[in-house]
Image (cartoon, helix red, strand yellow):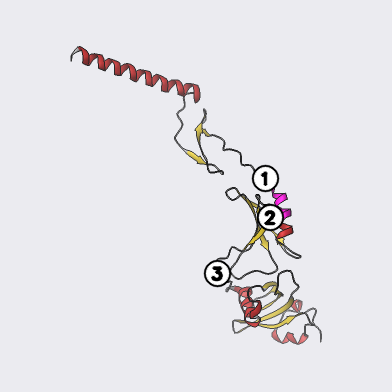
């Protein structure tokens, strides 16, 4: 090998030693000699952070600023989303949309929908999000009785709501409301040949003659002769 070749090899060796020393210096000064894996954690605001420090822990995510506390958002939700007899579930915050979500137990609902009250931080206002799946409640006593009421009162099919208060295998008693926020009525239903049938609905006196359907005494304790 000529002198020029030896000189080039020597220069490359010196550069390699320098780079290795610099890398080791960075490890010693920044991570106490620990080489962290190249991982990233996604933060709520959409940014990503890596591992650092002697224990290779993830760097803290940027602080997410919440303009409305859960308690403040609930006040707005209760004023704008619900009426008498209705209620809200626990609030869940969505960092991406800057909104608080509350499951809403409404007097009236839509078939196949699960309503929620959504409070916006930007506007300090709330609205109902029906979260409809298109799946109608056909299974169980409530679903079948709801369908019977929809067929009996088609003009209220989109707004009526059935709430079963007492139920056995073949009998049910509950309340039905037709318009949100408005009082409804009592109903009694029985299952004949595996099909539910509404035998009473309204606000009038319940006849004790309904005993013929085999209702448990506690479902007819307020009946009148």
Residue drawn at point x = 64 percent, y = 42 percent: 65
* 204 to the left or right of 52: right
Label 2 crowding class (10 Å Cα cut-off): few <14, some 14-19, many 20+?
some
Label 1 crowding class (10 Å Cα cut-off): few <14, some 14-19, many 20+?
some
Residue drawn at point x = 67 percent, y = 45 percent: 67
Residue 111 x/y as whole percent = 60, 71
Q: Image quarter for residue 216? A: bottom right
Q: Main secondary structure of the magenta part?
A: helix
Q: CA distance from mark 3 to mark 2?
A: 29 Å
The disc placed on residue 17 is none
Q: Is there any visible trace of residue 77 in the rendered image?
A: yes
Q: Is there any visible trace of residue 170 in the rendered image?
A: no
From the viewer's perspective, is the residue at label 2 or at label 1 nearer? 2
From the viewer's perspective, is the residue at label 3 or at label 2 nearer? 2
Residue highlighted by disc 3:
135
* 36 to the left or right of 147: left
Q: Residue furthest left?
A: 1
The disc placed on residue 67 is 1
Above or below for 170 versus 104: below
Among numbered discs 2 and 1, the one appearing first in the sequence? 1
Q: Which residues are magenta?
A: 67-76
Q: CA distance from mark 2 to mark 1?
A: 13 Å
Provide the secondary structure element on which disc 2 rests.
strand
The disc placed on residue 125 is 2
Residue 188 x/y as whole percent = 71, 80
Label 3 crowding class (10 Å Cα cut-off): few <14, some 14-19, many 20+?
few
Among numbered discs 3 and 1, the one appearing first in the sequence? 1
Residue drawn at point x = 63 percent, y = 78 percent: 150
């Amino acid at each position: 090998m000529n002198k020029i070749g030896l000189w080039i090899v020597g220069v490359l060796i010196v550069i390699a030693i320098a780079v290795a020393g610099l890398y080791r210096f960075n490890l010693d000064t920044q991570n106490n000699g620990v080489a962290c894996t190249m991982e990233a954690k996604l933060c709520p605001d959409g940014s990503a952070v890596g591992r650092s420090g002697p224990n290779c822990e993830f760097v803290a995510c940027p602080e997410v600023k919440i303009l409305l506390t859960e308690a403040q958002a609930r006040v707005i939700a209760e004023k704008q989303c619900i009426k008498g007899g209705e209620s809200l579930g626990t609030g869940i915050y969505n960092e991406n949309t800057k909104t608080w979500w509350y499951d809403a137990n409404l007097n009236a609902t839509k078939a196949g929908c699960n309503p929620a009250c959504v409070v916006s931080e930007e506007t300090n206002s709330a609205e109902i999000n029906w979260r409809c799946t298109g799946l109608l409640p056909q299974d169980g006593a409530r679903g079948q009785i709801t369908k019977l009421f929809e067929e009996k009162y088609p003009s209220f099919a989109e707004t009526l709501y059935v709430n079963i208060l007492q139920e056995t295998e073949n009998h049910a008693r509950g309340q039905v409301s037709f318009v949100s926020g408005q009082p409804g009525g009592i109903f009694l239903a029985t299952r004949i040949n595996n099909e539910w049938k509404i035998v009473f609905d309204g606000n009038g006196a319940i006849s004790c003659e309904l005993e013929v359907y085999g209702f448990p005494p506690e479902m007819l304790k307020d009946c009148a002769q």
